[in-house]
Amino acid sequence: MDHDDVRTLALGLDGTEERDHHGFPSFRTTRRIFATLPDETHLRLMLPEAEIRAAVAEWPGWAEEQWWGTRLAAVRVDLTACDADVVAELLQDAWRENR
């Protein structure tokens, strides 16, 4: 999976816009950011803590916790090793949570 795959999936979700976020692409609803592409090989998905922990537990080879300070804020996905179908579902979940 690569940035183009993520972009196609994200922009296919109703009302999603792509905007710059500190120099890298972000995908947003009218309310907030639900995903970012911080570098060439990673995707961050903004999900509730329970879903982040569940994803990391189920797919430890390519999903890890992303912390901002003391807050568990996202799941960080290694796009070079992930299961594309699962990532598509997680992307939809993040969109749904943040719209």
Image: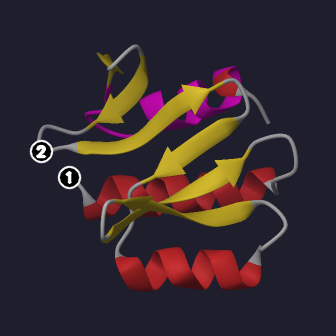
Residues 51 and 64: in front is 64
Q: Quadrant of residue 22?
A: top left
Tell me if residue 12 can be seen. Answer: no
Is 42 magenta? The answer is no
Q: Quadrant of residue 89?
A: bottom right
- As measured in the structure, the alpha-carbon distance from the residue carrying label 2 to the one carrying label 1 is 6 Å
The residue that appears at 25% across and 34% down in the rendered structure is: 15
Residues 94 and 57: in front is 57
CB-based contact (under 8 Å), mark 2 and mark 1: yes
Q: Is residue 3 above or below residue 51?
A: above
Mark 2 lies on a secondary structure that is loop
Residues 69 and 62: in front is 69
> Label 1: how many residues lie within 10 Å, few (<14), some (14-19) or many (20+)?
some
Tell me residue 64's x, y (percent): 64, 65
Residues 70 and 17: in front is 70
Left or right placement of residue 5 versus residue 99 in this view:
right
Marker disc for residue 31: 2
Quadrant where the N terminus is found in the figure: top right
Q: Quadrant of residue 86?
A: bottom right
Residue ranking furthest to the front: 69
Of mark 2 and mark 1, the one earlier in the sequence is 2
Residue ranking furthest to the left: 31
The amino acid on which the numbered mark 1 sits, given as a three-letter code, is Arg
Tell me how many marks there are.
2
Tell me residue 70's x, y (percent): 30, 70
Task: Kindly identify which residue carries mark 1.
Answer: 99
Q: Which residues are magenta?
A: 4-17
The amino acid on which the numbered mark 2 sits, given as a three-letter code, is Arg
Tell me if residue 17 can be seen. Answer: yes
The residue that appears at 75% across and 56% down in the rendered structure is: 85
> Label 2: how many residues lie within 10 Å, few (<14), some (14-19) or many (20+)?
few
Mark 1 lies on a secondary structure that is loop
